[in-house]
Amino acid sequence: QEGLLGNKVTSLLGIMDEGKDSAPSQWPLREDVASTLFSTITGNLIQQKFIAEYDAAPKIGLSMVDSFSSKLKTDTLTGFTALDHPDRKVLEGQDYPHSLSFSDKYVEARDPSKTGEYIAITEETITYDQTNMVIQKAQQIAEAMADFQEFKIIGGMFDAFYVASPAAGVYWPSGSVNDLYATGDGNSNYVTGSSTNLTIANGVTAIQTARNKFADMTDDSIAGKPFTQTPNAILAGDKDADNLNSILNSEFFPASGTNASARNPLKSTRHAYNVFTSPWVDWFRASGTYTKVVAAAWLLGDFKKQYTYKSVFPLQSFLIDGAGQLPSRLKDVIFVFLVREKGDIYALDHRRTVYVKGAA
């Protein structure tokens, strides 16, 4: 852009003036192409600022979960629950047993939510040379889009949006919405009880309690068979960050008895955890609206195996020329810069993450 227009182009008005005033030797394009080039260059300028702000926004959501692209309104993610004879010994020369009751286990990833916003560039915006205002608006939209994606992912991991009717939530086994963190079955992934909050006094015990919950999980293929799972990540609030650092890295932790301490069993490579903290966790805890995320709740598990983010289209930006459209021209809109994103988080199973209530 700089090589074509020279160093004088510093604003939307400058771009427009360059297109109008340059001689053919300086601007080797026809007039109709030059007017189009104005929109293109301006759109690129806004897009660069938008993408830079979006990339710079603090976010951890997509790094915690798996993701896939889809062009379907509803995706069926398949597997199987049971085989007739997975434990039968096969002798030499014999056929392998055929499973007569092969049954599909699947979850659905429903039509995800779509978000977006646009900036209308009017003649006044250019005439009054409000370049900084346009760029600031693009940056604000980028930050808001990044925030909303974090809101969806963090909230979804806690199943904050679950409603039985009308059906809403992240876990859709066999096509029906379920409470992801149910408390009534043998594979319960919900930890209650005292001393499960992430304080210095309780943190080590809380993580051990949550980890032990995975030992009670069972597989579907053989009754009572352990569901092999190694939790490797913790999701908590930003307010827990300092405590988690001490809980996981201190040589000793508080034990029962006055001024007593014991060697920290979590300080080993065997219990290495990726720690994720987010202000959105603190926000959900305090919101009062999303009551599934209680005041000190946190998660332990293998998040990439538990959750997937379905992306129908990732973050996209478009430049829409409004100069030839009557409704736009009636509002003196030269062109529109539109950004959008369509995606949501879904759970693949209920046994790979444990929800900890975090009671004192």
Image (cartoon, rainbow, N blue to C red):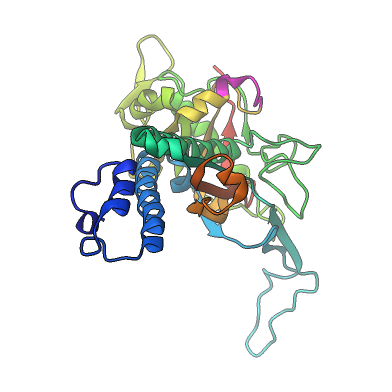
Is any atom of residue 358 visible in this view?
Answer: no
Q: State the image coordinates of residue 331 (x, y, percent, origin top left).
A: 56, 39
Q: Quadrant of residue 174?
A: bottom right
Q: Is residue 138 left or right of residue 6?
A: right
User: Residue at 19% across / 53% down in the picture?
Assistant: 6
Magenta highlight on residue 289:
yes
Task: Judge whether 90 appears above or below 9 on screen.
Answer: below
Viewer-proximal residue among 272 and 263: 272
User: Residue at 72% across / 39% down in the picture?
Assistant: 179
Say which quadrant the N terminus sits in: bottom left
Viewer-proximal residue among 150 and 130: 130
Start and end of the magenta stretch?
285-291
Say which quadrant the C terminus sits in: top right
Q: State the image coordinates of residue 150 (x, y, percent, origin top left).
A: 50, 38
Task: Judge whether 220 appears above or below 350 on screen.
Answer: below
Q: Is residue 171 left or right of residue 100?
A: left
